[in-house]
């Protein structure tokens, strides 16, 4: 599969953690995303997410705020930023990270495209942290891709999706070091 890239992927980006979660985040989810991403970025990890509303947007913005790198994986061509309110954010990401897509320019953000996006988020990451989500959500597809690829899945208790994932064997994360201590 071809990957289209805007910005730069560096060798150091191999040290990456995916941070994903609900589009309809709670204030708790927003605060946890900022807390975890700040610590990951301080330790030199690139943050990978899907540029969606909610947790993904906060993860990208937090990485940039902390002076870190971030990679956004799109479910559309690189010329179609979805959601459109993240256009300015996508320009900032290009300066200190990359936009990545498996789709050529002109590809619209069809719902089926986001499953492939979720797989690429996992493929670019050493671990996946699920902040929060609903029981039926794309967040679970990212966790499934990770589990099937042998990538550690971490989840913060307190939402339908994360509580389900912890029950299925995801690693409970209560603080950033729970994730960082497992990284090689």
Image: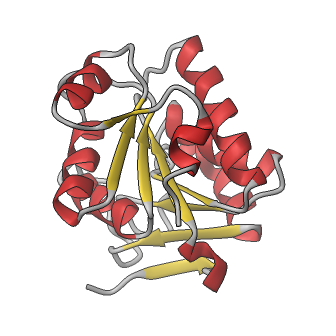
Q: Nearer the viewer, residue 1 or 113?
A: 1
Residue placed at 36% from the left, 78% from the top? 104
Whether residue 183 is visible here, answered yes or no, is yes
- Report the side of 64 relative to 178 (left or right): right
Count of number-bearing discs = 0
In front of the other: 98 or 29: 29
Residue 131: where, in percent of width, then height?
Answer: 45, 30
Quarter occupied by residue 14? bottom right
Q: Residue at x 63, y 48 (%)?
A: 60
Residue 74, horizontal then vertical, whole percent? 42, 60
153 sits to left or right of 178 = left
Q: Position of residue 115 (x, y in %)?
A: 22, 55
As drawn, 17 above or below 14: above
Q: Relative to residue 35, is residue 13 drawn left or right?
A: left
Q: Residue at x 24, y 63 (%)?
A: 150
Q: Give the image's coloring scheme.
A: secondary structure
Say above or below: 17 vs 95.
Answer: above
Image quadrant containing the N terminus = bottom left
Q: Position of residue 123 (x, y in %)?
A: 35, 69
Question: What residue is rendered at 52% in x and 56% in y?
Answer: 17
Residue 58 at least partly seen: no
Residue 166 vs residue 50, the one in the foreground = 166
Query: Dividing the picture into quarters, in which one does residue 34 lie?
Result: top right
């Amino acid at each position: 599969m071809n990957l289209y890239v805007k910005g730069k992927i560096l060798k150091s980006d191999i040290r990456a953690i995916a941070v994903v979660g609900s589009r309809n985040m709670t204030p708790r989810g927003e605060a946890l995303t900022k807390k975890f991403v700040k610590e990951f970025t301080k330790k030199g990890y690139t943050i990978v997410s899907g540029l969606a509303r909610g947790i993904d947007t906060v993860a990208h913005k937090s990485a940039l705020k902390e002076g870190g790198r971030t990679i956004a994986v799109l479910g559309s061509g690189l010329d179609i930023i979805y959601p459109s309110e993240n256009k300015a954010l996508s320009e900032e990401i290009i300066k200190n990270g990359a936009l990545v897509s498996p789709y050529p320019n002109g590809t619209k953000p069809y719902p089926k495209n986001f499953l492939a996006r979720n797989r690429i988020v996992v493929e670019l990451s050493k671990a996946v942290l699920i902040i929060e989500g609903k029981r039926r959500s794309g967040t679970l597809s990212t966790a499934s891709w990770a589990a099937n690829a042998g990538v550690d899945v971490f989840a913060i208790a307190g939402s339908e999706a994360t509580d389900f994932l912890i029950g299925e064997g995801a690693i409970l994360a209560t603080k950033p070091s729970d994730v960082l201590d497992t990284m090689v």
